[in-house]
Image: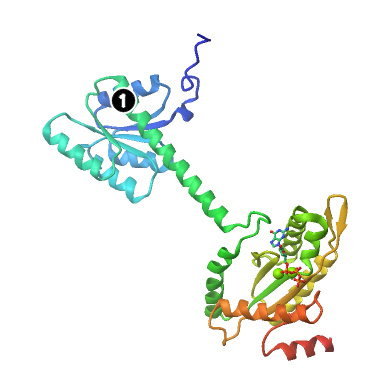
Amino acid sequence: MGQEQPNPESGRPAEQRGSVLVADDSRLVRSIVASYLKTAGYGVEEAENGQAAMRLLSRGTFDVIITDLRMPELDGFGVLAAVKRLGLTVEVIILTGAHAQDMSSAVRALRLGAHDYLTKPPASADEVILTVERAIEKKRLREANHRLLRELQSLSRTDGLTGVPNRRTLDEALPQEVARSRRHGHPLGVVMLDIDHFKKVNDTHGHAGGDEVLRSFARTVASTLREGDVLYRYGGEEFVAVLSHADLAGAMNAAERIMKAVAESPVQVGSATTEITTSAGVAALASSDADGSSLVARADGALYEAKRSGRNRAQASGAHLALVAAGRRAS
Ligand code: GH3
Ligand code: MG
Ligand code: MG
């Protein structure tokens, strides 16, 4: 046999063990339950009725409330209902008498969402502590679940390689952007980007080198965008920047800025440096666009034109094309 293992709970400060609010109009019951818990290392506060309990709950963070059912001002059912209504994460343990009628009230409280019940006076400190331990375990598991769920949601919305939001997030965000733009009458631009000759990067520097170029590209492009504009990885070496408040001319400016920044930011891949360029297809929301997909499709069409006419250039889509091109030549 080795050394005896220390109880991991016993050395912990009270706030780690858990914090418990004890609500009962009987000072005696309160002090018995509270002293059991304090001795076991919990942080404990007391309330003499439901109203006082709710005041404390709204101010502090408690893991568990142990509450009497019959109390003046606000009874245990009222406390339970308020906890649920306010969406508090505190677990509720009911204190109840041992008569049949009390039991049926306890059952009703369980159905309304209480975690468990204790009969009073509690049979032993162990019974109280065990019930509280289980309630806290449940609460912590639920919190861990929420955290994991949030992390999963964020992972599923983010491109793992570059860290920018992914296509799925674009598909969710674009209809909202389009609706906002139409409701408020402000323009909405998109720039679709595709790295030029990216296959050559992979061929020359390997897939890992290509990945490094993608990461660097996303960083460079994102850093040229204005606040509120968002870069998404559309797939492969294609990206889409959604520019709220940008009309076609504004989006063309942004595309030129992006191309310049990319061309001026050679990427270090191992011991080598590689220069890259990007082509851009640009479109702004028009009344003829049924939805966001048709806006992106037009940007995609313009991107194809940009590739066809030599790469490392931005091409505007749609009827404004000639006007914009003329304007740019004149300036
Ligand atoms: P173009 O100028 O016409 O765009 O030429 P390109 O070579 O860039 O075009 P193409 O779309 O044919 O090639 C894209 C390449 O990008 C092919 C694919 O293997 C590579 N690719 C796609 N996703 C990734 C990735 O996540 N990492 C790496 N390293 N390469 C990727
Ligand atoms: Mg490409
Ligand atoms: Mg491509």
Displayed quadrant of residue 168: bottom right
Quick check: 229 above or below 301? above
Which residue occupies the extreme left position in the image? 100
Residue located 52% across and 76% down the image: 179
Q: Secondary structure at mark 1?
A: helix
How far across and how far down the image is residue 284, in percent?
Answer: 65, 81
Residue located 85% across and 65% down the image: 264
Residue located 32% across and 29% down the image: 131
Q: What sort of colour scheme is used for the picture?
A: rainbow
Give the side of residue 119 with respect to residue 268, left or right.
Answer: left
Residue kind at label 1, given as amino acid type: Val
Instruction: Confirm or reject: label 1 Cβ below 8 Å from ligand 1.
Output: no
Foreground of the two, 186 or 141: 141
How far across and how far down the image is residue 111, in percent?
Answer: 23, 44
Residue located 71% across and 79% down the image: 304
Quadrant including the C terminus: bottom right
Displayed quadrant of residue 225: bottom right
Foreground of the two, 61 or 242: 242
Displayed quadrant of residue 222: bottom right
Give the side of residue 95 with respect to residue 171, left or right.
Answer: left
Give the side of residue 276 with respect to residue 67, left or right.
Answer: right
**Ligand 3 falls in quadrant:** bottom right
Give the labeled residue for mark 1.
Answer: 128
Foreground of the two, 185 or 147: 147
Quick check: 290 above or below 27? below
Quick check: 226 above or below 122? below
Which residue occupies the extreme front position in the image? 203
Asked whether residue 225 appears in the rendered view, the answer is yes
How far across and how far down the image is residue 313, in percent?
Answer: 79, 77
Give the side of residue 127 with respect to residue 318, left or right.
Answer: left
